[in-house]
Image: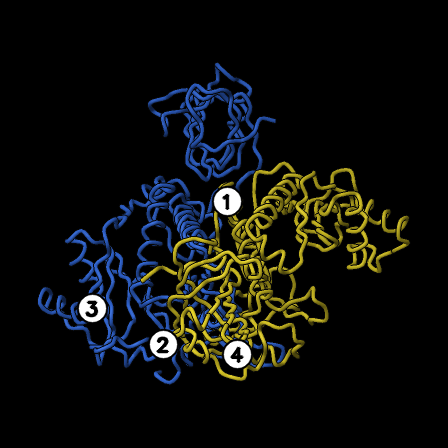
Chain colours: A yellow, B blue
């Protein structure tokens, strides 16, 4: 059996190819049926001509939207077809039939209410734009892990069932663990620090964290996928910022290169920050907000969502999609090292990309006396 | 400041180097102190001579086991030193001091009871043999993900809080989710199948699964790290076995190449199965157990631990550390496709490596009528 290839790999005027996927669209023009077939990599047009292949033409009369089909045929150049190539079929097989009518349309941009989408999530996920989100996420994780693997970090998986919280008390999901009380892990922070004390030197985890917060905004999610890093033998927090800067630049470059089609589909202009990321102090950040935008965060010890957005605009205008804010007040971040000679600032920072906090970091205090 | 390198990268007669790590051993021979320093990559000997560097010699008198030190110096060839190289120091700094006495020894093979080890887990984790386990695991995950990334699989992360079980009922951990009952995820299976129905074609997850089983044996763990794969558009279960065989061969090769030191430390002879893995039917497996070992599993529809071990011996003697058992009875695995023309066998298989079930797979039934 001829091996199946993806639609994006079909070249015009190549030898016979086999493709398989869902029937995205059917256009019946009398003696001519156009089938648009969709696989993970895109769309391709199959042209069934009554004169040219009467038996296949007969068979394709029964096809329905979202049926799964396998087609073998000859690729031909075509100006009208998506991707500039269409297939003249020599074999046609229905692998599985879809229900008809469908509870929601995949190919057309018809507004569907959220409950219908969630009730039919397996269909909803077929939208190329939705698949693109998953593909982009996959490319991003792969690229991040690649960078840290290359730099010699140990890939760890920390326990998710825990005896207590790593950060605070109120936001834990309780769980019954063989008749004992336990909680879902809020953060791998303490495990990571134990591994530093154990001499593992540099570790990362692509893990899950759980927060039982009221989810009033899109910034609060009960179950979070987190990319988490810890490293020892640093001089100060600038070393950590270097790691964040270099890994992010690498990952964005890789995504831009490997997922061009998906970025186009979602109309995303991925801005890879090639220049050094500006590193400003918390005080400088407040100053920019006050003088340029007349904005004062409600909590004077932290930036608010609006403040981050405005700072994002400020730095994007200067050609910097990403920047660091360093030295948040240490009363809030007692576990971070102080900045020597500064009574207020800690070595905690945020990385802001396009006006959104993308990650946080800092140099933790390792001396229990000083803490 | 001269950049720190790892002990394993110190070459004899090279230029001045900087290393940092824990003090593994101290040997005081009068006018001579040998310090063995341990970092993630191994051990290195630093020789302090009273005559040669009196000030550093004076300073090193106070050193304690497991102190964290930084040393700059000249690497010299030495037959007696571990790795054939020692360092003549020019700078010596104590970064952090360890408590004394230590609750457990790191450098010596002294039997310590489990509760002391767990009470001092951060110290216990410092043992090079323990670190080696984490490093090997990291290399294995990285290699597996590499293979699947290269083959175009989408890296997914499925939800861990679920409304019910994917496989059975009794083994779930209950959790309180905003005043609603929920459970910890038992398996990503249903999510993976939804993604197949959604046209994602090939996905993998390095994830966690939870099983509230009685943990009477080492085969039962409450929180499991699983590498999970799903692919569509296969001909039959042989395609799945091909994927398992090729990815495992690749991953073992990579681990053998990248973690030679760790394998040596743990005295593991990693057997990379280069030849095709034998694929035998469940009936053939029972036959070998009966005729060669006189062994009959208690449950005639499944293999037991002893049976897997004996089959492992049988195939290792023939030069095959890994093999598949195919066609487990379908009454137990109703969700697997039947083998055509066989009233009993399903398309479920196990992969056994060195007498242990390493993974399971099969071709699932996608036709709700047939199931």
Closest to the observer, A118 or B65? A118
Disc 1 secondary structure class: loop
Question: Does the residue at mark 3 contact the one at mark 1 (Cβ under 8 Å)?
Answer: no
Labels 3, 1: front one: 3
Disc 4 secondary structure class: loop
Distance Cα–Cα, label 3 vs label 4? 37 Å
Distance Cα–Cα, label 4 vs label 2? 24 Å
Closest to the observer, B1 or B349? B349
Distance Cα–Cα, label 1 vs label 2? 41 Å
User: Residue A153 got which mark?
Assistant: 1
Q: Name the outermost residue toward the left.
A: B291
Q: Write down the quadrant of residue A29 in the picture.
A: bottom right
Q: Residues within 10 Å of mark 4 (few under 14, many from 20)?
A: some
Q: Give the residue at x 41% y 49%.
A: B143
User: Residue B365 got which mark?
Assistant: 2
Q: Give the residue at x 41% y 43%.
A: B106
Measured as percent of width and height from the top left, residue A154 is found at 48, 47
Q: Give the residue at x 66% y 51%.
A: A270
Disc 2 secondary structure class: loop
Labels 1, 2: front one: 2
Left/right placement of residue A358 relative to residue A164 reads right
Measured as percent of width and height from the top left, residue B178 is found at 63, 77
Same chain, labels 4 and 1: no
Labels 3, 4: front one: 3
User: Residue B281 got which mark?
Assistant: 3
Labels 3, 2: front one: 2
Q: Residues within 10 Å of mark 3 (few under 14, many from 20)?
A: some
Quarter of the image for the N terminus of chain B: give it.
top right
Q: Earlier in the sequence, mark 3 or mark 2?
A: 3
Measured as percent of width and height from the top left, residue A306 is found at 80, 59
Which residue has dot 4 on it? B163
Question: Does the residue at mark 1 contact the one at mark 2 (Cβ under 8 Å)?
Answer: no
């Amino acid at each position: 059996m001829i091996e199946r290839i993806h639609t994006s790999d079909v070249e015009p005027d190549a030898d016979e190819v086999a493709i398989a996927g869902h029937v995205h669209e059917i256009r019946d023009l009398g003696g001519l049926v156009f089938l648009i077939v969709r696989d993970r990599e895109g769309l391709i047009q199959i042209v069934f001509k009554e004169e040219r292949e009467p038996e296949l033409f007969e068979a394709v009369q029964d096809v329905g939207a979202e049926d799964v089909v396998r087609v073998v045929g000859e690729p031909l150049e075509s100006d009208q077809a998506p991707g500039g190539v269409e297939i003249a079929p020599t074999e046609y097989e229905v692998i599985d039939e879809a229900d008809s009518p469908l509870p929601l349309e995949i190919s057309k941009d018809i507004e569907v209410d959220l409950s219908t989408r969630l009730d039919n999530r397996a269909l909803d996920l077929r939208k190329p734009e939705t698949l693109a989100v998953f593909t982009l996420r996959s490319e991003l994780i792969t690229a991040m892990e690649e960078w840290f693997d290359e730099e010699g970090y140990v890939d760890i998986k920390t326990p998710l069932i825990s005896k207590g919280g790593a950060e605070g008390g109120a936001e834990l999901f309780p769980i019954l663990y063989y008749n004992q009380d336990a909680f879902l892990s809020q953060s791998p922070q303490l495990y990571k620090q134990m591994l530093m004390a154990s001499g593992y030197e540099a570790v990362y985890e692509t893990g899950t964290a759980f927060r039982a917060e009221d989810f009033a905004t899109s910034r609060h999610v009960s179950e979070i996928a987190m990319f988490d890093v810890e490293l020892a033998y640093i001089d100060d927090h600038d070393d950590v910022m270097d790691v964040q800067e270099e890994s992010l630049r690498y990952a964005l470059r890789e995504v831009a290169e490997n997922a061009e089609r998906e970025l186009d589909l979602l109309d995303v202009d991925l801005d890879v920050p090639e220049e050094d990321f500006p590193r400003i102090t918390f005080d400088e950040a407040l100053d920019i907000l006050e003088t340029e935008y007349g904005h004062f965060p409600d909590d004077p010890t932290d930036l608010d969502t609006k403040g981050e957005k405005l700072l994002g605009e400020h730095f994007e205008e200067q050609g910097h999609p990403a920047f660091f804010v360093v030295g948040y007040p240490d009363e809030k971040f007692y576990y971070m090292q102080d900045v020597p000679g500064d009574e207020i600032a800690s070595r905690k920072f945020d990385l802001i990309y396009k006006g959104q906090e993308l990650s946080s970091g800092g140099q933790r205090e390792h001396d229990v006396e000083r803490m």
